[in-house]
Amino acid sequence: MELAWYALLGLFFATYLVLGGYDYGVGLLLARGGSPAARRAALTALGPFFLGNEVWLVAAVGILFGAFPVLEGELLSGYYPAVLGALAGVVLVTAGVQLRSRPDGDRARSRWDRVVVAGSALAALGWGSLLAGLLQGLPMSAAGHAAGVTHLFTPFVAAAGLAMVALVAAHGATFLTLRLPEPDGATAARLARRLIPVALAAVGAATVVGLLSDRVRVGAQQPLVAVLLMSLLVTALLGARVALARRRPGLAFAATSAALALPVALVGAARWPWALVSGTDPVTGLAVADAAASAPTLSLLGWLTLPLVPALLGFQAMCWWIFRGRIDGRAPVYW
Amino acid sequence: MDTLLLARLQFATTTSIHFLFVVVTLGLVTLLVGMQTAGFLTGDPKWERLTRFWGQLYVINYVLGIATGIVMEFQFGLNWSGLSRYVGNVFGAPLAIETLLAFFLESTFLGMWIFGWHRLRRGLHLALLWGVAITAYASAFWIMVANSWLQNPVGYELRDGVAHLTDFGALLTNPTLGMAFGHVLAASLLTGGMLMAAVSARHLIRRTPDFALFRTSLRIGLVVAALAIAAVQGFGFAQFGPVGQVQPTKFGGGPGRDALVAEWTARFGPGDWTPPVLSSVGLGFMILIGLTLGCVWLLLPLLWRDAVIRLRFPLWLILFALPLPFVAVLLGWIAREVGRQPWAAYGLLPNSRAVSDVDAGLMLTSLVGFGLLLGALAVTNWVLLARHAARGAHDPALGRPPAPESDDFPRQPVLA
């Protein structure tokens, strides 16, 4: 029962990173400047999906609160700076994207675009740091509560945060390759092909720094799974690069999506059966089974929400289907 | 400054800003459903123009509702980890249900509605707005279930100091829920109706074009506000009985309060177990505003032969009354929330045990950071709302028809 909810939590957060990831990627790429029309086109490419993407985060935190209340309290307060940064980023992007085109002048819109760029960078840094922090462990007091926040300031957390920024940028460029009309799509494809090696290098650097850290080596309770998922991540990025070279943007997008979902699977699976590890040897922490809500709550949530999860996915899929394909003259422009 | 006070200030700030935007969201979406449905049924283009104009204001307003809502959701874990540790088994359930069954769908539908103009079949486009409205109401309901549980914890048993769910039905029949939910919905309709009437009044005062359009929305706004204020007063006064029974410390003295304070002192040790006076002062002002807004009924006879417009001074009255519903909802919320102090969950979990074990400096950073961020965004949002409201209904960006397709002009996005 706990495992099913833990998997569902992971699924929602991973989906958020995939979908929100291209929002932030497109947001970061606004930093390249470009004509006002080009920036507007990038936001139009996000268009109808944007609101539906951000809600995966809200739903993930809802599952976290409902099904793993103890974990929710310790995790959010224990990783306070990372969560704060990510949250500020999410708020800036949410407001920036939706409000940037409401003023008429190009200067006001450019100012809002800078807000979106800063927010996207903060969100990616924050979520990358949180995932890294989970892997390297959370020092706990004798009573089993998170203690202090300085544990977050390590080279591994910084490297992983930067790797996440590089990953979402590559993912965003790949998304634009799929969505922008030609010839802008081809320009985005060239950009994506340049960004994927950068992401690979950043992920590689984070891996090396992680392997050198005692706390990460202790935290990874299932080293085999960790190595397997890590190599899948690298394979996905290489695959995306090959697919872009062969002009298969759909495949490339699937591959970069996998690259954003895999870190969540890695952090979840590598520490199994722990939801939080202490980062000390021998490992203590909060086990997934102890972090879960008690049985009546889980069965209530199960009966009430699980039958409706297919409907949630169905309505999201309907949105993707209606607005599929490249944007064109019939694409509604609003953001 | 101690962490507890800072955490409480942050919660108060975020909730207040959130509440000012969500009442407008709930109120306007109801009116939008009415207008778009009328357009669908009659085919009169006036309704589509009204829906686009008010829909644009609704969508701008919605931004801050989400932004502050996300911060609120995270704040429970960031600043109030004791809440999830001790009562998360019960309190977390309605919040999880809200995010999954209500908010998730609301945003998904809204995204499709914004971008679905001229692209989806009209029936489907209308159904999406109905979906947005229904899920918005569901969202308000589950949030009120969660809040009512903090006001009056029910349906649980304590084992080792941790609350476990025993009876979910009790959460839904909580005496602090029903009337309060009706009160909040009616207050939202009142705010939405007043906003609509006031913006229309300003256009009619300035004699901008689109007289017919704003005449219609003035009438809708006034009638809705009048009906809503009656419901606000009814649901409001109806709460005194049940709330006074389950929360004797909320509205001041009496033997019930003294007995309860004595019991808490025995269970939790000596301390100040009564709420600050601030809450009941605010309540008094809120009731005054509520009674004043009841005067909307006096304007209804003036709708006959447009006297309300021809006399002009009623238009000014409506315009100047616009801040009143906003002040009233804030005061009402403060009365409900501050009146629950010093408890996170009334009589079960004191604030001091609910607050996170976070350094005061960090909490201050978070308070100042999010206070400035959300405050600045709120002000910017209101400025944008005011500008778009003043600009009039001739061509809102929402629902603007795309450029026609032609053979010698490839279909490129029109980006204006």
Image (cartoon, helix red, strand yellow):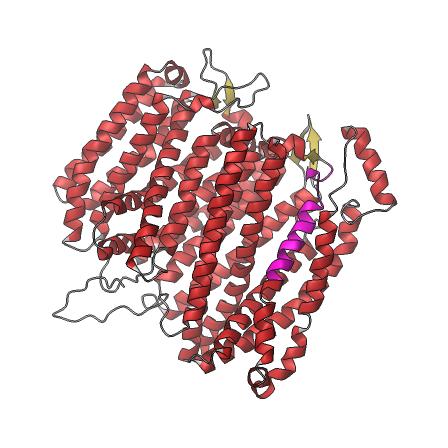
In the figure, A142 relative to B69: above or below?
Answer: above
Viewed as shown, does residue B135 lie left or right of B388? right
Percent across and percent down for residue A218 are: 40, 15
Q: Using the image as rendered, state which of residue B262 and residue B315 is in the foreground.
A: B315
Viewed as shown, does residue A101 lie left or right of B236? left
Percent across and percent down for residue A225 are: 34, 22
Q: Answer whether residue B370 is magenta in the image.
A: no
**x 16%, y 41%: residue:** A244
Percent across and percent down for residue B387 are: 43, 65
- Quadrant holding the N terminus of chain B: top right
Q: Quadrant of residue B274?
A: top right
Q: What is the magenta segment's predominant secondary structure?
A: helix
Q: Is residue B85 visible?
A: yes
Q: Answer whether residue B340 is magenta in the image.
A: yes
**x 48%, y 31%: residue:** A80
Magenta stretch, residue numbers: B325-347
**x 45%, y 21%: residue:** A151
Percent across and percent down for residue B366 are: 50, 36
Q: Quadrant of residue A213?
A: top left
